[in-house]
Image (spheres, rainbow, N blue to C red):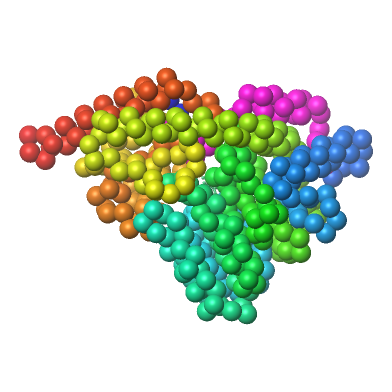
Amino acid sequence: MIYLDNNATTQLDPEVAEVIRQVWASGPLNASSQHASGRAARARLDRAAAEMGRLLGADVQQPGGPQLIFTSGGTEANNLALHGVGDPAAPLIVSEIEHPSVLEVARRQGQQGRPLHWIPVSSQGVADLAALEDLLAQCRDAAPLVCLMSANNETGVLQPVAEAASICRRFGAHLHVDATQSVGRLPVDFTALGAGSLTFAAHKFHGPVGVGGLLLAPGVNLTAQWQGGAQQLGMRPGTEAVALIVGAAAALSRACQDQQANADHCRRLRDRLEARLAQTVEGLVIHGRQVPRLPGTTCAAFPHVDRQSMLMRLDMASIACSSGSACASGSSEPSYVLEAMGVPETQIDGSLRMGVSKFSTETEIDRASELISLCYQRLRESEDVENQGF
Ligand code: PLP
């Protein structure tokens, strides 16, 4: 199989798998227990938290400094932020292209009476900061919660989060950044960014599925959504998954160490894939091509074909990619991200997302571009035949 679905999840790095195996093999691991084994688990957990904080520009050991709350992944961290940060009745200002773990919570809170406003995006998929400023001016004195992701999971388009953070600070608003797609892939410095909170998930940077985190700026209070344990200062109770957290720290450390080289590799392969497809697929459109994107991600519209039919053919040809966010794949819902960008329906119908990783090779990309072009030509031919009523 040629795996091009790295925005949904990435392959676990074998070295990280070995770290996790060793932690699991080392014995019982309850970091709240007072005996020696519990204290050893606590020490491992604290070291992993400090290391991840350091790599993300947050000194989580400093008293009164930023805090890192471990969660089961990006979805939980986003839910925790939207439900737990600030006044639950304060206005919400959310970009139209957020991941469903932000969008659906916001919609539900809006239905329950929380004031909800949307930040539109440009045709290239970049959030409109002038609109954000206008919305903040309307909500003055209400300490709103603003949600803007660092990079979109369908198009890979990078969002102006640093500028948004400075605007939010000016208006006394809390900025929550869903950085699930960029942590590990691009440098992230939480303190320099100046956001109020930030989400990440280890499985996007070759770490294990099932662990992520929410970084909180100094002084940000989080209301726990669950009760029944004192772990993580009661803010997210439950026995911590020590082995997964240690694995996440190892994965982040590896990702940051080789970040530039990995990004260059991914960008080169992504550009190669796009160039080859553009040669063989007439009228191919790359969404967000004119603005900065994640190094390995491409979202392309194949003219006059249906994305689900393309995906099925590609799957049979052993190519794994997707039609958008993992939650939306398998369904035939059109992409709300492309809709928000004003992409014509005919292009949305044939849009696919492909993403490479540090494990992708040039040989794979060359083979994938041949197979994708072939699947596209065959599908066009079969659809032409159907349309002619044969
Ligand atoms: N946010 C973004 C931008 C994502 O891409 C994803 C996963 O696709 C999530 C949140 C959810 O993360 P998880 O799958 O770890 O719950």
Would you place residue 76 above or below residue 164 in this image?
Answer: above
Q: What stretch is highlighted in magenta?
A: 4-31
Tell me if 20 is positioned left or right of 110 in this view.
Answer: right
Q: From the viewer's perspective, tell me whether residue 204 is left or right of residue 341.
A: right
Q: In the depicted view, which residue is nearer to us: 290 or 221?
A: 290
Residue 123's place in the image compared with 130, above or below, is above
Query: Which residue occupies 37% across, 23% down?
Result: 366
Which residue occupies the foreground of this view, 211 or 167?
167
User: How many numbered markers are drawn?
Assistant: 0
Give the residue drawn at x 38%, y 45%: 289
Q: Where is residue 225 in the image (x, y as percent from the top left)?
A: 68, 60
**Identity of the residue drawn at 53% across and 56% down:** 160
Question: Residue pushed farthest top?
Answer: 363
The image quadrant of residue 315 is top left
| 311 sits to left or right of 19 | left
Q: Which of 9 and 330 is in front in this view?
A: 9
Residue for point 91% across, 42% down: 34
The picture places residue 230, in percent across and down from the top left corner, at 81, 54
**17 falls in the magenta region:** yes
Can you say which quadrant of the picture contains the N terminus? top left
Please determine whether, in this image, residue 139 is positioned above or below residue 208. Answer: below
Name the residue at the right extreme. Answer: 35
For the question of whether residue 226 can be seen, the reply is: no
Measuring from the top left, give residue 146's x and y in whole percent.
57, 65
**Is there any visible trace of residue 179 in the rendered image?**
yes
Residue 239, image x and y in percent?
76, 45
**Quarter of the image containing the C terminus?**
top left
Q: Is residue 343 located in the magenta-colored stretch of the structure? A: no
Q: Nearer the viewer, residue 88 or 180?
A: 180
